[in-house]
């Protein structure tokens, strides 16, 4: 058999279905035993950390399941033989065959996989490699696309669930001389009412909307005394450290919050808008790196688990943590979707790149052995990167620091 394991995300910074040789017995059991030992140690000596890790795993499993389900559904639609749909990695806890596919739950809850008939071997009629290029493309990108659509639902549910929102608009508390805001005429005490025509109800909205329009002049409506004034302010790509895109500091008009829960006919459109805004913010962040605004900040599973725990602990009740955690899951899903589309070995985008090379060569495939080597090198590089990032995550936590600071 020339079957492949299609494994799912291991974490937010290292994700996507890719080939993985199946069948090993010793190492998976060792991994399961190590995982069990970590659980026992955490229960007795680090319960807060264990709780954060559990929340992170629940979020991760949901995102991975949705990603892999998209690969599974599109493969089924196009008649690709699906051997197994697994949640977690072996050794197996439970399995049941339904039709031609076996559905399994496995001991290591750090991802998932869909095991398809060979990706590179076109000799088998129901293999992925034997399908037309447009069908292979859809199967390969479906997981990432699903991760980019899922946030609409997550944001909508977060907005529909009772949550706290600041009711004070953003007030300008400082204007840096010679910065774009000062040149546009913003003054201390101005209250920001709208950015590019979008109502800004609080500080976070004002900050987010300004960052959406980096690289161009944006209309900012402020209230000065009893007068509404429209100003055109340029939002910079790479401002000096501590200045922000426009060169102002802002604070809340009132130190109050209110509990808000939107009906579906409002939360769903807003979920669409927030998802689109998040994609634009991600794009702007990447562009800003090339414009000189500094490099990216990476976080592995340890860092993201820490962040998950901090988000959960920001509220006084479990119910109050639901909306922030759903918003975090939405952002992680967008992260996974974008990352998986990058043309890097082992990721969905890397496999799509080989498909595009095949198209450019007028149907001539790269030798399966060579493609497999490229993806194997990519896997090794991701493992090394994960180890390095995890080391820095643990060092940061040991020093009492947070991703938020």
Image (tube, rainbow, N blue to C red):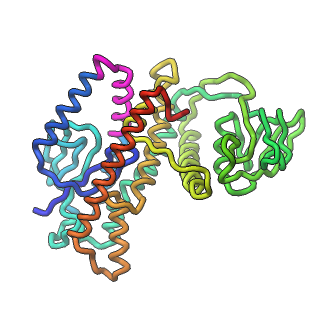
Q: Quadrant of the N terminus?
A: bottom left
Identity of the residue drawn at 18% across and 69% down: 121
Up/down of 346 relative to 362, above or below: above
Viewed as shown, does residue 354 lie left or right of 331? Answer: left
**88 sits left or right of 180 in the view:** left
Please state which of residues 368 and 241 is positioned toward the viewer in this rendering: 241
Report whether residue 153 is seen.
Answer: no
For image coordinates 47% across by 40% down, the residue present is 154
- Give the image quarter of residue 349: bottom left
Residue 186, position as x, y percentages in the image: 83, 42
Q: Residue at 32% of width from left, 39% of height from top?
A: 61
Residue 76: image location, x then y, percent: 25, 58
Q: In the visual, does 150 lie left or right of 107?
A: right
Q: Which one is in front, 139 or 218?
A: 218
Q: Give how far across and how far down residue 327 sits, in percent.
A: 50, 37
Residues 177 and 356: in front is: 177
Q: Is residue 282 above or below residue 119?
A: above
Indicate yes or no whether the magenta region holds residue 173.
Answer: no
- Apparent side of residue 319 relative to residue 28 in the rendered image (left or right): right
User: Residue 236 at x, y = what percent?
Assistant: 70, 52
Q: How many marks?
A: 0
**Is 358 above or below relative to 233?**
below
State the residue in front, 3 or 159.
3
Magenta stretch, overall SS: helix
| Magenta-drawn segment | 42-61
For residue 317, say whether it is visible. yes
Q: Residue at x 45, y 51 (%)?
A: 148
């Amino acid at each position: 058999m020339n079957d492949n394991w299609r494994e799912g995300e291991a974490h937010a910074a290292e994700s996507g279905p890719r080939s993985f040789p199946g069948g090993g017995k010793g190492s998976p059991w060792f991994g399961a035993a190590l995982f069990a030992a970590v659980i026992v140690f955490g229960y007795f000596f680090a319960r807060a950390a264990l709780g954060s890790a559990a929340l992170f795993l629940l979020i991760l499993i949901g995102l991975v399941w949705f990603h892999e389900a998209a690969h599974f559904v599109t493969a089924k639609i196009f008649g690709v033989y699906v051997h197994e749909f697994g949640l977690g990695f072996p050794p197996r806890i439970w399995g049941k065959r339904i039709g031609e596919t076996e559905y399994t739950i496995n001991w290591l809850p750090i991802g998932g996989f869909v095991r398809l008939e060979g990706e590179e071997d076109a000799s088998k009629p129901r293999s992925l490699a034997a399908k037309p290029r447009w069908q292979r493309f859809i199967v390969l990108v479906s997981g990432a696309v699903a991760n980019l659509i899922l946030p609409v639902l997550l944001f909508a549910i977060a907005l529909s669930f009772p949550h706290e929102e600041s009711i004070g608009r953003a007030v300008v508390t400082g204007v840096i001389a010679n910065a774009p805001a000062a040149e546009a005429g913003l003054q201390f005490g101005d209250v920001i009412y709208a950015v590019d025509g979008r109502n800004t109800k609080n500080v976070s909205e004002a900050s987010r909307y300004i960052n959406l329009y980096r690289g161009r002049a944006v209309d900012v409506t402020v209230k000065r005394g009893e007068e509404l004034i429209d100003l055109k302010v340029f939002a910079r790509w790479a401002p000096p450290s501590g200045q922000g895109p426009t060169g102002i500091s802002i604070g809340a008009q009132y130190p109050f919050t209110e509990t808000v829960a939107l009906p579906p006919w409002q939360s769903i459109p807003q979920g669409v808008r927030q998802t689109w805004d998040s994609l634009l913010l991600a794009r702007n962040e990447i562009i800003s790196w090339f414009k000189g605004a500094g490099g990216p900040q990476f976080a592995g599973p340890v860092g993201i688990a820490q962040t998950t725990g901090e988000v959960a602990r920001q509220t006084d009740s479990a119910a109050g943590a639901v909306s922030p955690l759903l918003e975090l899951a939405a952002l992680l899903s967008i992260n996974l979707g974008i990352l998986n589309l990058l043309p890097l070995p082992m990721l969905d985008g890397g496999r799509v790149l080989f498909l595009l090379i095949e198209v450019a060569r007028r149907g001539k495939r790269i030798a399966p052995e060579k493609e497999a080597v490229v993806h194997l090198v990519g896997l090794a590089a991701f493992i090394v990167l994960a180890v390095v990032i995890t080391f820095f995550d643990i060092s940061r936590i040991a020093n009492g620091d947070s991703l938020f600071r």
